[in-house]
Image (tube, rainbow, N blue to C red):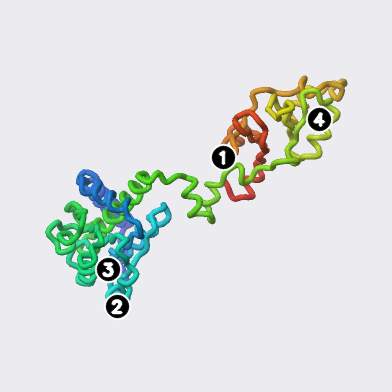
Amino acid sequence: MALHTRIAKPRPAALDLDSAKRVLKLEAEGLNALADSLDDEFAKAIDVLAHVKGRIVVTGMGKSGHIGRKIAASLASTGAPAFFVHPGEASHGDLGMVTQADAILALSNSGETAELSDFIAYSSRFSIPMISISSRSNSTLAEAATVSLVLPAAQEACSLGLAPTTSTTMTLAMGDCLTVALLERRGFSADDFQQFHPGGSLGNQLMKVKDLMHSGEAIPLVSKDTLMSDTLLEMTAKHFGCVAVVDEKKVLLGIITDGDLRRHMTDDLIQKRAGDIMTTGAKTIGANALAVEGLAIMNEKAITSLFVLNDETMVHGVLHIHDCLRAGIV
């Protein structure tokens, strides 16, 4: 029977759980060892990457290549232009994608991956800085690198000790360390992050209040001297279930909600002024705040609308909970 068609023998579920727990514990031990091993070489690597005028070219063979693709994607999505080049393709023309303004991030657990030899030679020939991630400080790759990041000794989680498991987990984690440290070094913000993630759930969660709010004539506004008969008309016409009471400069004085109307339901309600009914100290939000923050406030306060202020005083817009839900913000 061929190996790839071998059928696994049944065994108690507890043994499968034991296997899974052993893997996680061994990989966790590897990550703890990695955290303890970081030194000045890591800071040097960040210095190199922070001063790259071009792009970060990530390369690796086999499992290291798969990890490298993820690292390149993480770097690119956090403001550090990066892409992955397969070392085999590099030897057949793709080295032309690497310029002297770039930096190379080369991954190899052994540090002796033959397919990386052309990358090593190219880096040396054109003085292109190269950062290596490997498990041997005296390997060919580590000794040729501008900065060598060495993974600590750790047991592979594979029971045979053959399949890359703990080593690939540590390599991936090292890539995340580089990505986050570089992000923080560059002062990459949530605004920047949104520029690279305009679609999908990440983009939705980073939308600003100003992207969703209603403004201009859509805002329900009255003055404190407006009769409640006219205030009710404004609330009904604008469909937000509330109205902002403002002065002549649109500074927020208070708000009137459906709840306020119910609490003041008397025979002379429509003869009263908005200032007599309004509630002061209403919860508001700024236009540049994340829309998800606005949704959180509305959920916490059990309300459906928030008035948006400029300079913390002037009414600039109104955000409704339905606007957030339609935009996929949860």
The residue indicated by pointer 1 is 288
Q: Look at the numbered discs 3 and 4 and tell me whether their residues touch, using CB distance below 8 Å.
A: no
Task: Give the mark nearest the N terminus, 2 or 1.
Answer: 2
The residue indicated by pointer 2 is 92
Q: Nearer the viewer, mark 2 or mark 4?
A: 2
- Residue 199: horizontal and vertical position, in percent? 54, 56
- Residue 139: horizontal and vertical position, in percent? 14, 62
The residue indicated by pointer 3 is 61
Which image quarter is the C terminus in? top right
Q: Look at the numbered discs 2 and 1 and tell me whether their residues touch, using CB distance below 8 Å.
A: no
Q: Which mark is residue 250?
A: none
Q: Amino acid at mark 2?
A: His
Q: Is residue 114 visible?
A: yes
Q: Amino acid at mark 1?
A: Asn
In this view, 89 is above or below 18:
below
Q: CA distance from mark 2 to mark 1?
A: 49 Å
Q: Amino acid at mark 4?
A: Thr
The residue indicated by pointer 4 is 231
Q: Residue at x 60, y 42 (%)?
A: 209
Q: CA distance from mark 2 to mark 3?
A: 15 Å
Q: Residue at x 50, y 52 (%)?
A: 195
Q: CA distance from mark 3 to mark 1?
A: 44 Å
Crowding near the residue tagged with mark 2, few <14, some 14–19, many ≥20 C-alpha atoms within 10 Å: few
Task: Give the mark nearest the N terminus, 2 or 4.
Answer: 2
Q: Amino acid at mark 3?
A: Met
